[in-house]
Image (tube, rainbow, N blue to C red):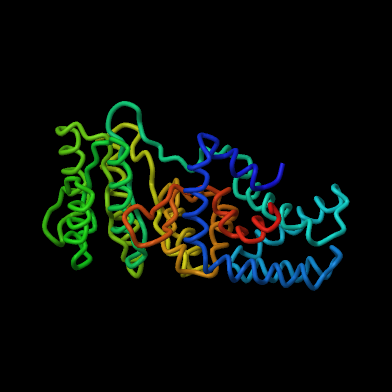
Amino acid sequence: MGFMDKLKNKFKQNEEETEDVSKKYKQGMEKTRHSFSGKLNDLIARYRNVDEEFFEELEEVLIGADVGVNTVMGLVDELKMEVKRQNIKDTNEMKNVISEKLVEIYYGDDDEEVEKLNIQEDGLSVILVVGVNGVGKTTSIGKLAHQLKQEGKNVMLAAGDTFRAGAIEQLDVWGERAGVDVIKQGEGSDPAAVIFDGINAAKSRNADVLICDTAGRLQNKVNLMNELAKVKRVIEREVPDAPHDILLVLDATTGQNALSQAKTFSDATDVSGIVLTKLDGTAKGGIVLAIRNELQIPVKFAGLGEKIEDLQEFDAHAFVYGLFADLLEDEAE
């Protein structure tokens, strides 16, 4: 079974869904794909045989896509074993092998449900959203609220980023766009108090999901982490087993810097998933694999454009298809 067949299998409900998801990833990852596929095509054209020199240059292409040195070394070792196992000689046969190995590396020992939000069937689900200023945190919250509302959920927002000028107003605007209520206090108020109010309001209005915004002033790292810990304690006290997800928002265009932010936040809070914004704006989308492989945190959503519906539930098959679309489609034909 080729990679395209596996992609269709993943979205087996119908052919239209496969095309729709595939198209969004193909368009959204155009910059990364042109850079990555172009270099991979050149490499395959220059080397007829799969040898040591081919693998050395492949390492450089993958590192250049921000896949991350540790991840690349592991991937290339696995590719070498696969080449021996399948007795592959021709470099043209490497396209499918590389794409399948990237999906395997992403999932590791986990099943493919790791990308789903942990929404409770009964009672209130609380999602805490963290990340530094400027990564698209508030925008992502608005888009996520819109998506959950489209799924029939009663959603509310809590404006816990009380320090950044304009953050509360910005969340208000997104609340209006998504058609959901925003619980807020004045600028400079205690974030934990806002979240407390948000939980009480969500309970009294029988909300299904409360999404909590938080501050992101990383220059005051110790203060910020203490503040997040306090917010988390309030949530845990008011809603058993919450927060049900702690989503870290990262900007894909910052590459390895995003990886170091992920390490900082995952040390301080139990980050359960990543929202990777601006994936459409970078030629180095391989950062998805570096984050997953080096931190063992799944990417749950990917930002593939500006529109409210452009925050896509992440899917590693569709992501890898976005990287290889042109090469895989040529092969399918």
For the point 44% across and 55% down, which residue is it?
302
Whether residue 149 is situated above or below residue 178 in the rendered picture: above
The percent position of residue 223, horizontal first and vertical second, equals 31, 61
- Front-most of residues 251 and 238: 251
For the point 49% across and 64% down, which residue is it?
260
- Residue 105 shown left or right of residue 87 in the figure: left
For the point 31% across and 52% down, which residue is it?
143
Indicate the quadrant containing the N terminus: top left, top right, bottom left or bottom right.
Answer: top right
- Residue 269 shown left or right of residue 4 in the figure: left
- Front-most of residues 247 and 26: 26
* Farthest-out residue, front: 333
* Farthest-out residue, left: 186
* Farthest-out residue, top: 122
Indicate the quadrant containing the C terminus: top left, top right, bottom left or bottom right.
Answer: bottom right
The percent position of residue 20, horizontal first and vertical second, equals 47, 48
The percent position of residue 268, horizontal first and vertical second, equals 41, 53
Whether residue 58 is situated above or below residue 3 in the rendered picture: below
Whether residue 142 is situated above or below residue 10 in the rendered picture: below
The percent position of residue 225, horizontal first and vertical second, equals 35, 57
Could you tell me how many numbered marks the image carries?
0
